[in-house]
Image: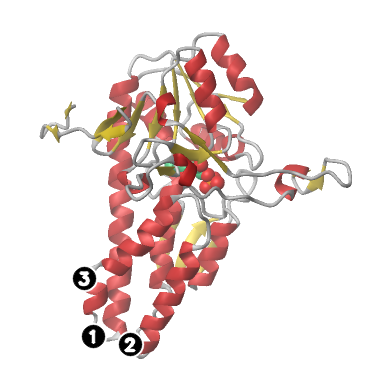
Amino acid sequence: MLRAMEFGAAGLRILDQTRLPSRTEYRVLKTPGAVAAAIRRLAIRGAPAIGVAAAYGLALAVGPEMTLGRARSRLAAAAALLKSARPTAVNLAWAVERVLAEPQVAAAQDSAALSQALVAIAAAMEGEDRAFGQSIARHGARLLSGVRGVLTHCNTGALATAGPGTALAVILELWRQGERPAVFADETRPLLQGARLTSFELGAAGIPHQLLVDGAAAWLLAQGGIEAVIVGADRICRNGDVANKIGTYGLALAANAHGVPFYVAAPSSTFDPELARGDLIPIEQRAEAEVLEVGGRRQAPAGARAWNPAFDVTPAALVTAYITERGIVRCRGGRLVWPEAETPAGEVLS
Ligand code: MRU
């Protein structure tokens, strides 16, 4: 399995996703500032992955030789920096706050103990995200079993998480179980996460697939044959509204217009119980150059301006179901209904 990141004595080693698929380049990040910068420039990206990277980023703030006072003030500064790296995916702030709230962090009596605790907590979060992805894949494959064609958007696989992924992991699991749906992936303008990264992951898994320009998705759905659309999420509000990669909302509208189920696959760390509705989600605006240029070369005429929101919000009414590590969640009467229990065999009773 591809690994987006790996923590070791030298620092946080990440696969630089801005270079894929033409180059496989790793970078070793040694400071919280370097982790925040890598998150901002999308060298590491995807909601769960940036949460885990931020947790490791906090561990990089503290050295065992520092005074405890200095270690704690560096930790606070790193937390603020990492949380502000990108605004939309709730996993980032969630991960930072969760690390700081762990009892071992408050209890540490010296910087060596604090440093050790931070690394252990980040590693536990990485392991948890991996397990969540495996569970999402299992639940999703059961739900989508039998579909003849599936369409996805952006990149939601191993590169976007610490494990097998979310939406893409469901597709991979279907194939692993011997199902053979036709797989389609939006290229995902402007940064081409679909064309560069999802296609790379599908290719590595030996899964035949076709890319399409984002503007072709509605027309593909009109042809029939696509029996499920499945995407990931950056934040899911209390009422079920979903922020995800720009283009997701249009895809959900088109899927609904053609009677195709629209699924959102995400771990519980992507659900934001603090936020009531989607219009309250901060949407990241990125540089105009991402739209005006392709591959670093200007395409638009001089003087042209661009509007470049990185995410959009899909209303809960357009979402058929949410696939989580705890099972299938549905939105009923404006609130999310979680599965009450799972049998030991992992069967969902909802
Ligand atoms: O800007 P990106 O590439 O970080 O956006 C990623 C997405 O929108 C993904 O769909 C989302 O983070 C879920 S990743 C499992």
Q: Nearer the viewer, residue 63 or 79?
A: 79
- Taking the view exactly as shown, the residue that stands out farthest to the bottom is 67
Q: Nearer the viewer, residue 213 or 337?
A: 337
The answer to whether residue 194 is above or below residue 88 is: above
Image side of residue 260 versus residue 223, left or right: left
The residue to which callout 2 is attached is 68
Q: Indicate the position of residue 268 as horizontal and vertical percent values.
A: 31, 44
Amino acid type for the residue under numbered disc 3: Pro
- Between discs 1 and 2, the one toward the N terminus: 2
* Residue located at (39% from left, 87% from top): 70
Figure quadrant of the N terminus: top left
Secondary element type, mark 2: helix
- Taking the view exactly as shown, the residue that stands out farthest to the right is 302
Between the C-alphas of marks 1 and 3, the distance is 12 Å
Amino acid type for the residue under numbered disc 1: Gln
Q: Nearer the viewer, residue 244 or 68?
A: 244
Secondary element type, mark 3: helix
Q: Indicate the quadrant where residue 99 lies.
A: bottom left
Amino acid type for the residue under numbered disc 2: Leu
Q: Decide: few, some or many residues near mark 1? Use Cα within 10 Å; few <14, some 14-19, many ≥20.
A: few
Secondary element type, mark 1: loop
* Residue located at (43% from left, 13% from top): 148
Q: Indicate the position of residue 71 as horizontal and vertical percent values.
A: 38, 83
Q: Indicate the position of residue 247 as horizontal and vertical percent values.
A: 58, 32
The residue to which callout 1 is attached is 109
